Amino acid sequence: MFEELEETQKEQSSPSFIAYIITALIAGGGWFLYMQISEKHIEKQVEKETKNIAVQMAIEEEQKYKLVQESGSSMDKCVHAGAVALAWLQTQNSERYKKWKEIEKAQCAKVGIYTD
């Protein structure tokens, strides 16, 4: 009788193999979800940083255009206005892109280049 009682207590006090499996599955599932959420967060951060870099480059192109406007030829102004327009296109800022396409069109018309 005591032997049966001891065996019953051993079975009850030590976790079963199934409990280990369930714990491992829950932990694995939690880890998987955590990694998925982290990956999405990292992707958003990379996208945000890339956009910031593109905006900074567009601003730098505008600054270069201002320098060309002071001392460059009409052809230089045409080319650099196009570069600014393309830089704003990379940022997907349609308002600034359209503005600079109009500037490019006006500058290029001065040297006999007509764009549509």
Image (cartoon, rainbow, N blue to C red):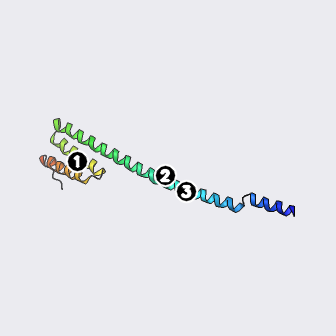
Q: Quadrant of the N terminus?
A: bottom right
Where is residue 108? Give x, y as percent.
16, 48
**Numbered disc 3: secondary structure:** helix
Classed neighbour count for the residue bearing mark 1: other residues with Cα under 10 Å, few (<14), some (14–19), many (≥20): many
Q: Could you tell me how far apart the alpha carbons at marks 3 and 2 are, in whole angstroms?
A: 10 Å
> From what the image shows, is residue 71 above or below residue 80?
above
Residue beneath the point at 72% across and 58% down: 15
> Amino acid under label 2?
Ser
Report the side of 107 relative to 39 (left or right).
left
**Quarter of the image holding residue 12?**
bottom right
| Point 24% across, 46% down: residue | 84
Which of pointers 1 and 2 lies earlier in the amino acid sequence?
2
The residue tagged 3 is 32
Task: Report the disc number at residue 82.
Answer: 1
Which residue is located at x 68 percent, y 58 percent?
20
**Which residue was labeled with disc 2?**
38
Point out the tag, 3 or 2, that comes first from the N-terminus.
Answer: 3
The kind of residue tagged 3 is Phe
Residue situated in front as seen by the camera: 55 or 113: 55
Query: In terms of sequence position, does the residue under pointer 1 or pointer 3 come before the other?
Result: 3
Where in the figure is residue 7, as x and y percent of width and height? 82, 61
- The residue closer to the viewer here, 47 or 58, is 47
Give the label on residue 90, or none: none
Query: Which quadrant does the C terminus fall into?
Result: bottom left
* In the image, residue 16 above or below residue 85: below
Q: For marks 1 and 2, give the one nearer the viewer.
A: 2
Q: CA distance from mark 1 to mark 3?
A: 47 Å
Q: Residue furthest top?
A: 71
